[in-house]
Image (cartoon, helix red, strand yellow):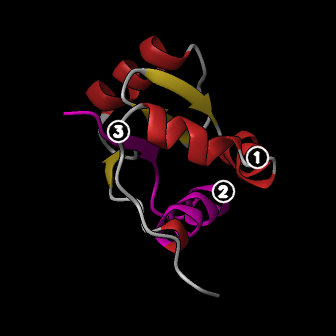
Amino acid sequence: MPEVQIYATAICPYCVRARRLLERKGVAFREIRVDGDRAQLKVMIRRSNRTTVPQIFIDEYHISGYDDMADLDDAGKLDVLLQRYGIDYREQSQ
């Protein structure tokens, strides 16, 4: 089953913003903490070719970081990706 995954750390401000954006949209996601888990950090780097957090995936599709996800959302393209991968969500009113 497709899922949204976020490789993140506890205190990264962009990680916090990514969580909030997905929560506002009502998207369930699995957070994979890489602070203190070198094995997961290596997996993140291998999957994304990046060393910074957050790294966000919809199933195997690499969105990249928070700024890229926010840009997709602003352009209406994040919803298209979520629908394409069969991710259920319900946008929360602000």
Residue 51 marker: none
Question: Viewer-proximal residue, 68 or 46?
Answer: 68
Which residue in the structure is indicated by mark 2? 14
Q: Is residue 60 above or below residue 29?
A: above
Q: Earlier in the sequence, mark 3 or mark 1?
A: 1
Question: How far apart in space, not on screen, are marks 3 and 2 (Cα)?
Answer: 25 Å
| Element at label 2 | helix
Question: Viewer-proximal residue, 14 or 84?
Answer: 84
| Element at label 1 | helix
Question: How far apart in space, not on screen, are marks 1 and 2 (Cα)?
Answer: 8 Å
Amino acid on which the number 1 mark rests in the picture:
Asp
Q: Is residue 38 above or below residue 25?
A: above
Q: Is residue 33 above or below residue 13?
A: above
Left-right relation of 8 to 3: right
Which residue in the structure is indicated by mark 1? 67
Residue 23: percent from left, percent from top: 47, 70
Q: Are marks 3 and 1 in contact (CB under 8 Å)?
A: no
- Could you classify mark 2 by the number of other residues whose Cα lies within 10 Å: few (under 14), some (14-19), or many (20 or more)? some
Which residue in the structure is indicated by mark 3? 86
